[in-house]
Amino acid sequence: MAADSASADGKQKWGVSASDVVYHFGTSGISVATATGITHPLDVLKVRLQMQLVGQRGPLIRMGKLSVQVVKSEGLRSLYLGLTPALTRSVIYGGLRLGLYEPTKYVCEMAFESTNILVKIASGAFSGAVATALTNPMEVLKVRIQMNARTTRGPVQELQKIASEEGIKALWKGVGPAMVRAAALTASQLATYDESKRVLTRWTSLEEGFYLHLISSTIAGTVSTIMTAPMDMVKTRLMLQRESKRVGRYKNGIHCASQVLLTEGPRGLYKGGFAIFTRLAPQTTITFILCEKLRELAGLKAI
C-alpha cells in the first residue's frame, strides 16, 4: 500500500501536461523577447564598440559619443538594425535558456540529493549552452546586420547570402565562445537570481513579489555582466571576422582572446563593457520581473 502511494506520488510529481510545457517555455520566451526589444539599441552600440580599433591600441570612443555619431550618420533606424533576428532568436533562446533551467535543476537535485548553489550553476550552464548551440545562426545574422547599415537585403536574403558565399558552417562561427558565454551568463544570472531570492527571503523581511524580484534581478544582472564581458567580446569578433582582416583570421576563441590581449591590451577584452552593463542589467531585470508575473498569471510557481 505504501509502495503504491509512493508510486502515485512520484507520478504526480513527474506528471506534466502539454499546457504546462507551453506555459513554461512561452513565459520564458516572451519575457526575454520583450527585454531584448527594449534594450536592442544598446546591443547595436555594444557590437560597434567591440569592433573599434581591431588589432590596435588607442583611445576608444565612448558609448554616448558613438550613439550620437551613429544616429547622425545612419539615422535613428540604425539603432534597430538586426531586430528581427534578435527577436526571433530571443523567443527560442529565451524559452530554452530559462525553460530548461528548472527541469535540469530538478533532475540534478534528484540525482545528487542536493540543492546547493553548485547544482544551480550547473543547471544554468547546461541550459544556456544548449539554447545557444541551437540559435547561433540567428546571432551570427544579427551581428552581421548590425555592422552593415547599408545593406538593402532582408534577414532571410542575408542568411541565404552567408550560407551560399561562406557555407552553412559559417552560421555557427563563434559557437564555441558563444556557448561558453551563454553557459556563464545563464549560470551566473539564474544561479545568482535564485540564490539571491533565497538569501533575501531568509535574512530580510522581503517576500515573494515585485521588490524581491527587482533586487534579485539587479544583483544577477551586475554579476553576469562582470562574468561574461570578455567572452561576449570574443564571440562578436569571431562572428565578424570579415571586419577583422587587419589581424587575419582567428583560429578559435582562445586564439582570438590571445590576439586581442597581444595587440589591444587587457582593456581590449572589455571594449563595449559599459554598453554590455547598461544593456544586460536592465534586460535581466525586465526579463525576470516579467517572467515571474507571466508565470503567476499562468498558474506556475515562481522561479
Image (cartoon, grey):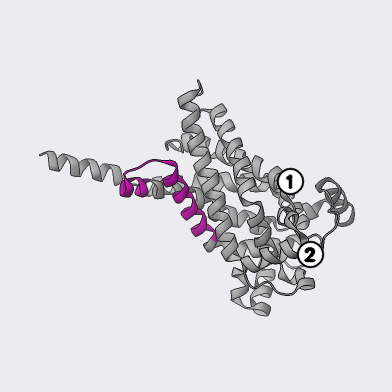
Q: Along the horizontal axis of the image, is 52 left or right of 105?
A: right
Q: Residues within 10 Å of mark 2 (few under 14, many from 20)?
A: some
Q: Residues within 10 Å of mark 1 (few under 14, many from 20)?
A: some
The kind of residue on which mark 2 rests is Val
Proximity of marks 1 and 2: CB atoms separated by less than 8 Å: no
- The residue closer to the viewer here, 158 or 177, is 177
> Residue 89: x and y, percent?
59, 57
Q: Is residue 114 magenta?
A: yes
Label for residue 148? none
Residue at 80% in and 62% down:
149
Dominant secondary structure of the residues highlighted in magenta in the image = helix
Q: Along the horizontal axis of the image, is 298 left or right of 48?
A: left
Q: Is residue 249 magenta?
A: no
Quadrant of the image containing the N terminus: top left
Residue at 55% in and 44% down:
189
> Residue 119: x and y, percent?
41, 46
- The residue closer to the viewer here, 10 or 196, is 196
SS of the residue at dot 2? loop
SS of the residue at dot 1? helix
Q: CA distance from mark 1 to mark 2?
A: 18 Å
Label for residue 274? 1
The kind of residue on which mark 1 rests is Phe
> Residue 269: x and y, percent?
71, 56
User: Magenta segment, which residues?
Assistant: 106-132
The residue pinned by badge 2 equals 54
Residue at 31% in and 50% down:
111
